Image: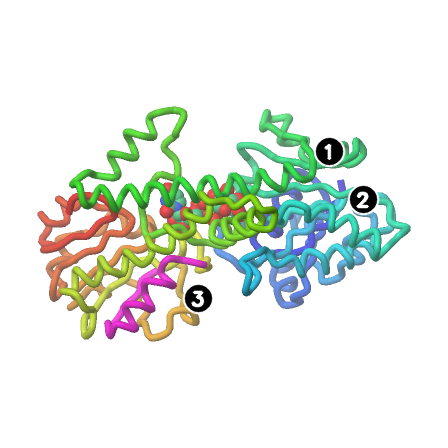
Amino acid sequence: MKIAMIGTGYVGLVSGVCFSDFGHDVICVDKASDKVARLTQGEVPIYEPGLEAVLARNVAAGRLYFTTDLARAVDGADAVFIAVGTPTRRGDGHADLTHVMAAASEVAQALTGYAVVVTKSTVPVGTNRKVAQVVREANPEADFDVASNPEFLREGAAIDDFMKPDRVIVGVESDRARNVMSDIYRPLYLRDFPVVYTDLETAEMVKYAANAFLATKISFINEVAALCERVGADVKEVARGMGLDGRIGNKFLHAGPGYGGSCFPKDTSALARTGQEYGVPQRITETVIAVNDMTKRRMIDKVMNLCGGSVNGCKIAVLGVTFKPETDDMREAPSLTIVPALVGGGAQVCVVDPHGQREGEALLPGVTWMDDPYAAVEGADCLVILTEWNAFRALDLKRLATSMATPSMADLRNIYDPADALAAGFTAVETVGRAG
Ligand code: UGA
């Protein structure tokens, strides 16, 4: 199959690279010529484990190209995937579809024969029909169908998630489009990964419902964690006890500083907005968003408490600022709420993050970046663990405590046993939902 992928952001790039690995001919399009030049050289602009190697082998095999020339990519393509950004629109919390519609219109004018125009970007229900309308208006002669094919990959595990998905969801309206999509995904269902065909609206809703549900699990356990702290229970064990029930499952029940990233905050907000628009408020999702905001703010109080009520004049070492490990992505990271509050409160903040500095420097002004956790805690009053990078999971707690001015720790990812930290010389330990 010949595939054009419009947009080389996270989803577009990973999808394009993986489709070429399935053996398809893929041309990825981006307006940014410097990015296209770098990708053509095999240079990946984001940190995603494994991506560079898969990209390189498919470029070398002559199956994967990058270009700024959309018309060239679309010419003769069996499917044109739109994978451009849908950020939260300022003011009303809805998904901003400007880029999607602009891409649809450009694609329409470049179509040379039958193609399926597939939306991979996360878009609110009803968008695929609007895409069809835009294509029709821009090119009344166009021979096309639309398809909704939301993506469920996680940053940091993107290649595996794409190659071994729990499911692929495809919303289509014609057999012709379904046949093209099934040729594209044949390598997956030959290996028994479920490919579910449905209508456009259902496919669009699956994506939002899935992300909102996962965000709900996280906000739920974060709220339970706050109660555990009051009643003396351990949220890790509560989550384990709950998760052993197969109906609940043990995933996404890790209490922490609140969810971040480019998806959950944006998608919960867009779902809530769609609910309001249709007069069916999504009250659970609205509450999930409010609890997540509260959770992030609650983390600031924990650090304040450890520093005796105010962080003014305190030296604080923060380990991890990306929204989760194995990514350099800082979008909506809890650190963006927590670290500025500490800096604003008069603390001197040192930050260590294996891949966060490149993006983080502009987003977290007034902090000092360091490479080594042990150097960062020297003379510090508080150690804050914000992202659970593997590099932070087996630190020598004794060595840390000894070099700190006041050995206190806010372990906001619950990666250490508070009893071990106390035994190692920490005098105060805050966790999320565990007895300290
Ligand atoms: C999420 C979904 O997991 C993917 O299925 C989906 O495709 C993607 O959004 C998207 O819509 O594009 P991602 O944002 O990469 O993926 O990251 P997650 O691993 O889901 O983590 C999101 C946030 O939740 C992180 O801040 C993480 O630290 C937090 N989290 C996750 C918790 O606090 N506790 C948990 O138990 C799990």
Residue on which disc 2 sits: 115
First to last magenta residue range: 332-353
Secondary structure at badge 2 equals: strand
> Mark 3 near mark 2, Cβ–Cβ under 8 Å?
no
Task: Please state which amino acid type lies under the numbered disc 1.
Answer: Asp
Identify the image quadrant of residue 78: top right
Left or right of residue 31: residue 108: right
Mark 3 neighbour density, 10 Å: few (under 14) some (14–19) many (20 or more): few
The percent position of residue 407, horizontal first and vertical second, equals 13, 60
How many tags in the picture? Answer: 3
Do the residues under discs 1 and 2 have CB atoms within 8 angstroms?
no
> If you read the primary sequence from the N terminus, does the residue marked by circle 3 or circle 2 appear first?
2
Labels 3 and 1 touching (C-beta < 8 A): no
* Up-down relation of residue 323 to residue 34 (above or below): above
Disc 3 element: helix
According to the picture, the residue beneath numbered tag 1 turns out to be 183
CA separation in Å, label 3 and label 2:
39 Å
Q: Residue at x 14, y 56 (%)?
A: 399
- On screen, residue 88 versus residue 178, left or right, reads left
Which label's residue is closer to the chain start, 1 or 2? 2
